[in-house]
Image (cartoon, rainbow, N blue to C red):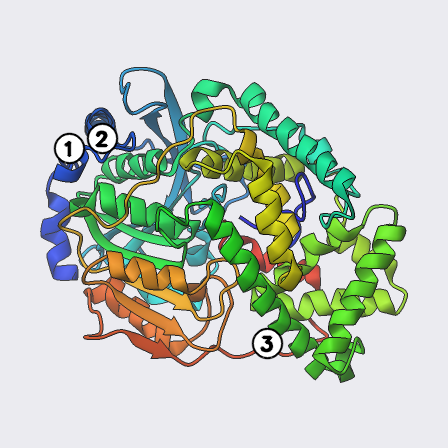
Amino acid sequence: MIRKAALGAAAAIAASATLAGALYASSATAQPTQQEQSGNGNGNGRAEARGAAIAAASAAKKGIDWQTCPEDWGLDPKIQCGYVTVPLDYAKPHGKKIKLAVDRIGNTGTKKERQGALVYNPGGPGGSGLRFPLRVTTGNPLWKNVSKAYDFVGFDPRGVGKSAAISCMDPQEFVKAPKADPVPDDEADKSAQRKLAAEYADGCKERTGAAKLQQMTTPNTARDLDVIRAALGERKLNFLGVSYGTYLGAVYGTLFPSHVRRMITDSVVNPSREKIWYQANLDQDVAFETRWNDWTAWVAKHHDVYGIGDTQAKVQKAWEDLRAAAKKEPIGGVVGPAELLGLFQGAPYYDSSWAPVAEVWAAYRKGDEKAMVEAAGPDMSDTAGNASSENGNAVYTAVECTDAKWPRDWATWDRDNTELHKKHPFLTWSNAWLNLPCATWGVKQRTPVEVGTGKGLPPVLIVQSERDAATPYEGGVELHKRFKGSRLITEKDAGSHGVTGLENECINKRVDAYLLKGELDSADVTCAPHATPTPSKATTLKRDQAAAQDLPRVP
């Protein structure tokens, strides 16, 4: 998901037809793999494997009762919606159940062309995939060929949105602004942030309940994904995962390798146990600084348009001056450094935000305070949006904190982030406070799955940009090593997050070839970057935000 500037900050700028017939005529159920049956010593073993098999068999019998989507879901009338029932705890498959919201639009081609369902996860943890079928209804040209062959299926993962949503604090309090500057001036500032983080962790346990919170893990979401596969009537899964969705795919491919037909992982979370999740966030701080510098250099290149500075150093100084002024006197009374970061971090995430963020900044420098407040400040009247934002942050925290063991001692956090901030100040402290609830997490923390230990996984297509800020390039390389037979496409000299959603023929044609024909190159491929953004007076931030709603969310 898109990161908040500090704990509780407001959200901003908040993937062969012949074979298919035989394949989908078979049973929708599949037996647990040998790896699952034996277990792997991390709480993802025999009991959960049996529970997942029981749940999948039940779902295959029941199917999904597809209906017209509720009007307040905001989806196209041509899209159908339904629910899939899964166990809260897979070790107790006959115990408490929860319902997961799913939606779909059928393939646009003929019955003969159909190759099954393509299931999508946009990332997070905490992102909703329910907008995925809109790529068909809006006529997205990048997905025209694939949509002829596949039903497009989205879902809200457990805890998200329409799927037994969880919460950690009052949504209106969550978005209230201005927040404290994420960069601490002294020990008192650090103590205040530590107190907020501990209170947030306590709130997650109190509002969600320990029993439910304990089950908010990536392995459980992977099991949910397998139950959804069975409910769809699919013997094997076709999956597109972006950002955190790549880690979900990596865990699924490890626990259920023989259940995978085709899988694309786009903008890859490093799946190493040593990275999940504490070190992954530290690595992200370094990558964000690099991509932030890419953007400020671009702003300087277009000084004639934005008038912010004609060198990268001058643009950086203008940013530091803006932060300092907003700290002294929040813009419009609500936009301080935390809120500014919530807006400006959109540029390192997505190239599509380069021009819109620069435009808001340029307008503010010319006296348009309203544009900055509307772009970076909270909308207290948008109670539904605020609830969604709080829910997304709650799921992000719950999954990352429960998935893995985090340092419990403040000295480790303080040492690592103080040192990192010296050369990578853009995101480091904000990221630390966002994740600090994991230091005092109130339920058992797991040991991550050892990704890549399953046998029988077919070739996976991995797509990664070289300068990605949210999921650094090394993650794609690591997954490539672990998934034998996979192919890695590198978008060189590029850094936008979510590569398969961008116009780049070198990548787009390979995505089509893989999904439609199962074809992969004989070796890894390096593609030239997609087109660099250009300033456009016709672009506005609000329009960009609307278009970006289906962009991947990041961890």
Circle 3 SS class = loop
Instruction: Name the foreground residue: 158 vs 415.
Output: 415
> Whole-Å distance between the Cαs marked 3 and 2?
47 Å
Identify the amino acid type marked 3: Pro
In the rendered structure, find residue 477 and report the number of the disc placed on it.
none
What residue did someone put label 3 on? 533
Q: Residue 198's spot in the image, x, y percent?
A: 63, 29
Instruction: Name the foreground residue: 488 vs 109.
Output: 488
Q: Which comes sooner in the sequence, label 1 or label 2?
A: 1
Reply above or below: 158 against 340.
Answer: above
Q: Residues within 10 Å of mark 3 (few under 14, many from 20)?
A: few
Determine if residue 64 is in view: yes
| Image-based side of 258 in relation to 423, left or right | left
Determine if residue 551 is in view: no
| Image-based side of 351 in relation to 170, left or right | left
Between circles 1 and 3, the one closer to the viewer is 1
Seen at 30% across and 33% down, the residue is 64
> Whole-Å distance between the Cαs marked 1 and 3?
50 Å
Q: Residue 520's spot in the image, x, y percent?
A: 22, 70
Seen at 26% across and 61% down, the residue is 481
Is there CB contact under 8 Å for labels 1 and 2? yes
What residue did someone put label 2 on? 45
Instruction: Name the foreground residue: 96 vs 62.
Output: 96
Identify the amino acid type marked 2: Gly
Q: Which comes sooner in the sequence, label 3 or label 2?
A: 2
Circle 2 SS class = loop
Circle 1 SS class = helix
Seen at 52% across and 53% down, the residue is 282
What residue did someone put label 1 on? 38
